[in-house]
Structure formats: structure tokens, C-alpha cells
Image (spheres, rainbow, N blue to C red):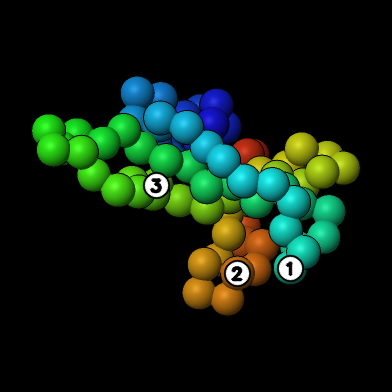
Amino acid sequence: MAVLAANKTYRAEQMASCDGGKDDNNPGYYVLRVNAYCREPQGCGSVLLGWYAVEEATGAVHEIVAADWQIGPRIDRDT
């Protein structure tokens, strides 16, 4: 989550939690769901900010292209 805040994808105060694990569709990566805080007084269901993949061997952080569930561009560096 620190990478998302450092790259100005989201502000740190927006992010409530993340969950996920290894994904059979993307060997060598952990796939994480980043969640936001719910601001509804009555409560709300899932508040998804986005899906991300962390490469197990290097720690590189990538977006997940949800349409086809593929590893997308790397976001934890400028190049």
C-alpha cells in the first residue's frame, strides 16, 4: 500500500486494507485487492480501490488488468 501512496495512486488515508494471496492464473505473483474505507453511515459492502500483483521474486508491484486477469504495467518505478 505504501507503493500506491508513494506513486500518488491513492492517498494513504483512503486505503483501509488489502487482502489476497497466490493466484494460480499468475504463478510467481501475489495478487492483492486494495480496499477503501466505507463512508456510508449505514455501512456498505466492498469498497474496491483496485487489484495489484506483487512479484514474489523481486517485490515489483504491477497493476492487474481485471478484464482478462493479466499482469499489467509495473507501477513501483518511473520506467
In the picture, the disc for residue 17 is none
| Residue type, numbered disc 3 | Leu
Number of marks in picture: 3
Per the image, the residue denoted by label 2 is 69
Find the distance from the CA under tag 3 to the CA under tag 2. Answer: 16 Å
Going from N to C along the chain, the mark reached first, 3 or 2, is 3
| Residue type, numbered disc 2 | Trp
Q: Position of residue 15 (x, y in %)?
A: 40, 31
Q: Label 1: few (<14), some or many (≥20) within 10 Å?
A: few
- Please, is residue 22 above or below residue 18 in the view? below
Using the rendered image of the protein, determine whether residue 33 is visible from the camera's viewpoint.
yes
x 74%, y 51%: residue:
22
Name the secondary structure under disc 2: loop
Going from N to C along the chain, the mark reached first, 2 or 1, is 1
x 62%, y 62%: residue:
72
Name the secondary structure under disc 1: loop
Q: Position of residue 59 (x, y in %)?
A: 76, 38
In the picture, the disc for residue 25 is 1
